[in-house]
Image (spheres, rainbow, N blue to C red):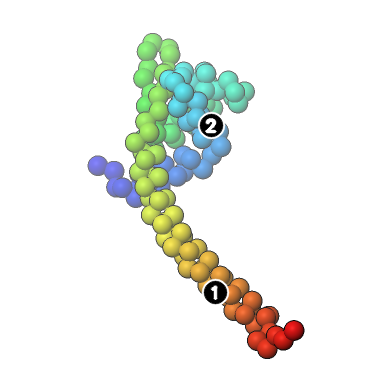
Amino acid sequence: MVDHSTQLDAVFHALSDPTRRAMLGHLAERERTIGELATPFSMSFAGASKHVRVLERAGLVTRIIRGRTHLCSLRAAQLAEADAWLKHYERFWNSKLDTLETLLREEDRTKEEKAVPTNEKD
């Protein structure tokens, strides 16, 4: 069994490369061969296959080999785990930003109160 944090590290490593992210986007549409994944990037089969191996190790892609054809498909479950991890920190930062917003609004109110003279007489 793979350690959860090791798997999460592999997912974020795989997502760190723009080519691999684009490949995942293509696989979200439908299954693709390695050649189809390579085409938009003008890369060799070997180059695309290396990217796919990183995605496979992260659990984001499965590859089925039928004869000489390598057919890849997206496994979105690992993305859901990464999303859950990110959502934890999103809640943390939203809480901090809500607190900051409250403080800034309070500061603005204080400045407005000081700017308006208390003894206005017409």
- Can you tell which mark lies on residue 106? 1
| Sequence order check, earlier mark of 1 and 2 | 2
Q: Is residue 122 left or right of residue 84?
A: right
In percent of the image, x 43 and y 20: which residue is there? 31
Disc 2 target residue: 22
**Is the residue 83 above or below the residue 28 in the image?**
below
Amino acid type, residue under disc 2 in the picture: Ala
Amino acid type, residue under disc 1 in the picture: Glu
Report which quarter residue 19 is drawn in.
Answer: top right
Query: Residue 39 location, x and y as percent?
Result: 58, 20
Residue closest to the eye, 90 or 5: 90
**Structural distance between the alpha carbons of marks 1 and 2:** 44 Å
Q: Is residue 87 left or right of residue 48?
A: left
Give the farthest residue toward the front. Answer: 122
Please tell me whether mark 1 sits on a helix, a strand or a loop.
Answer: helix
Please tell me whether mark 2 sits on a helix, a strand or a loop.
Answer: helix
- Can you tell which mark lies on residue 30? none
Give the farthest residue toward the top. Answer: 67
Give the farthest residue toward the right. Answer: 122
Report which quarter residue 117 is drawn in.
Answer: bottom right
Q: How crowded is mark 2: few (under 14 residues within 10 Å), some or many (20 or more)?
A: some
Question: Which quarter of the rendered picture does the N terminus lie within?
Answer: top left
Q: Which is closer to the viewer, label 1 or label 2?
A: 1
